[in-house]
Amino acid sequence: AALFSIERRWPFDWVICTALGFLLPRFTELRNAGVRSICHVIAKYSYGIYLWHWPLLWLWFRKIEGLPVPGRFLLFFASLAVLCVGSYHALEEPLIRVGRRIARPSTSRTLRPKPGSKASWEKPSEDLAR
């Protein structure tokens, strides 16, 4: 439970973030296919991880007592996986598709110049000849 305490253990945690920010451009593309696929899965469900991890940490490490710590970690990661995958497929992915449909211009809404007219972004050919 000390891992999740509110009091700060090290006053310079911003140093780690700053160092990581400076080091990120030095990293190269991952070549190991297994590591890449694991990172892809984590990236795909990262928003769900971000949303669900704090309530689940509170639930399994503050609210529920009597379970050994390894069991709490097991239940935390299992429930995190179920909730992240479930919320991604039930909410995130369908809403991403809706957003793509809304953002994709349809042919009826696209502004195009009439055939034979000079579009405002085009210079007339007479001006180029002068």
Image (cartoon, rainbow, N blue to C red):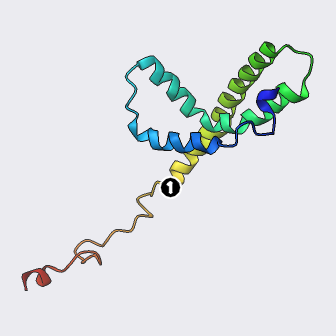
* Residue 40 placement, left or right of 65: left
Residue 107's x, y, as percent? Answer: 40, 59
Q: Quadrant of the C terminus?
A: bottom left
In the rendered view, tell whether residue 18 sits above or below residue 27. below
User: Which percent across, then down, holds residue 128?
Assistant: 11, 80
User: Looking at the rendering, in which quadrant would you find the N terminus?
Assistant: top right
Residue at figure coordinates x 18%, y 80% from the top left: 124
Q: Which residue sits furthest front? A: 11
Q: Residue 121: which quarter of the image?
A: bottom left
Residue located at (92% from left, 21% from top): 65
Q: Farthest residue toward the bottom? A: 130
Q: Please state the horizontal and vertical placement of residue 88, each as a whole percent of the image.
A: 64, 34
In the rendered image, which residue does mark 1 sit on? Answer: 103
Asked if residue 66 lies left or right of residue 56, the reply is: right
Q: Give the residue furthest to the right.
A: 66
Instruction: State the count of labels.
Output: 1
Q: Pinpoint residue 28: horizontal percent, then vertical percent.
A: 37, 32
Does 38 sit left or right of 95 as displayed? left
Foreground of the two, 93 or 36:
36
From the viewer's perspective, is residue 10 above or below residue 68? below
Where is residue 62, by image quadrant? top right
Residue at figure coordinates x 65%, y 43% from the top left: 12
Q: Amino acid at mark 1?
A: Ala
Disc 1 crowd, CA 10 A, few/some/many (<14, 14-19, 20+): few
Residue at 67 percent across and 30 percent down: it is 84
Residue 47: image quadrant is top right
Looking at the image, residue 101 lies above or below residue 35: below
| Disc 1 secondary structure class | helix
